[in-house]
């Protein structure tokens, strides 16, 4: 009978233990083959859902969980991250690996405690380096991504009202102030007031910049 797997975060020698979480079997197979070909890594389990991920992590005690952002019904990658990290300092590091390069998703991952956020078109060596870094306690975010997170969180803290966001969304759709006023059933002066308040809160001085900032933060489509 083999020895039980060590608890997450326990001291161990040998390769870094990885769990792959993705709802697409082809993606899991590709990642499994890629990572197992590296002597410093070993894939100890796969999971195709958030619930399955929590179960295999509890069973296998990995160093790093490589988790997709979108996992179908149930817990998504951020939910998995938040649940695992809530277990305390011995919890495994979680790297989000996704096709979604959205600022709002990146911020959600950061807030949940993810060690990093990588895109699926990342170079294999970059992915391996990120896993090794995460296992060593590093945060795997590029300077550009860090800046995007800072800007997005700043915008969220700006506290735009529902009416200010509605006005910005209509402006983003190409409407003039007069058209926005008609759509919102308010005066054109009121629209200008909403937009001016939004400019101030976002730290911008134009309609174009305000729309760009709100879109970047995931506040409007």
Image (spheres, rainbow, N blue to C red):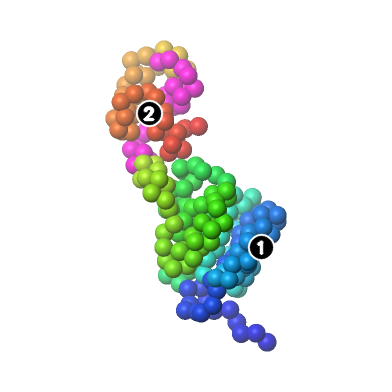
Q: Is residue 139 left or right of residue 189?
A: right
Q: Residue furthest bottom?
A: 1
Residue 9 lies in magenta, yes or no? no
Question: Residue 221 location in percent, x, y?
Answer: 50, 32
Location of residue 5 by image quarter: bottom right
Q: Nearer the viewer, residue 144 or 65?
A: 144
Q: Give the residue drawn at x 60%, y 82%.
A: 4
Q: Nearer the viewer, residue 140 or 170?
A: 140
Span colored in magenta: 154-177
Question: Is residue 163 visible to us here?
Answer: no
Question: Is residue 128 visible to us here?
Answer: yes
Q: Nearer the viewer, residue 41 or 166?
A: 41
How packed is label 2: few (under 14 Cα within 10 Å), some, or many (20 or more)?
A: many
Indicate the quadrant containing the N terminus: top left, top right, bottom left or bottom right. bottom right
Determine which residue is flagged by label 2: 210
Classify 173 as above or below 152: above
Q: Give the residue drawn at x 38%, y 49%.
A: 143
Residue 175 lies in magenta, yes or no? yes
Which SS class for mark 2? helix
Q: Is residue 1 left or right of residue 116?
A: right
Count the marks: how many? Answer: 2
Determine which residue is flagged by label 1: 33
In primary-sequence order, the first of circles 2 and 1 is 1
Question: Residue 97 location in percent, x, y?
Answer: 55, 53
Q: Give the residue drawn at x 58%, y 54%.
A: 68
Question: Residue 83 location in percent, x, y?
Answer: 50, 61
């Amino acid at each position: 009978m083999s020895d039980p797997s060590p608890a997450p975060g326990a001291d161990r020698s040998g390769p870094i233990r990885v769990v792959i979480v993705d709802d697409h079997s082809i993606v899991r197979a590709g990642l499994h083959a890629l990572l197992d070909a590296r002597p410093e890594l070993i894939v100890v389990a796969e999971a195709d859902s958030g619930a399955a991920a929590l179960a295999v992590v509890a069973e296998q005690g990995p160093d790093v969980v490589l988790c997709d952002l979108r996992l179908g019904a149930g817990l998504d990658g951020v939910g998995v991250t938040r649940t695992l990290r809530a277990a305390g300092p011995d919890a495994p590091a979680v790297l989000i690996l996704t096709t979604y390069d959205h600022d709002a998703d990146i911020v959600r991952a950061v807030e949940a405690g993810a060690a990093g956020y990588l895109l699926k078109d990342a170079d294999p060596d970059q992915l391996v380096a990120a896993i090794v870094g995460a296992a060593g306690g590093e945060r795997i975010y590029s300077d550009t991504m860090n800046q995007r997170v800072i800007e997005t969180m700043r915008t969220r803290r700006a506290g735009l009202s529902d009416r200010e966001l509605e006005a910005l969304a209509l402006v983003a759709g190409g409407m003039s102030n007069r058209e926005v006023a008609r759509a919102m059933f308010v005066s054109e002066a009121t629209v200008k007031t909403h937009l001016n308040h939004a400019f101030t809160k976002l730290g911008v001085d134009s309609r174009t910049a305000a729309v760009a900032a709100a879109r970047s933060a995931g506040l409007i489509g």
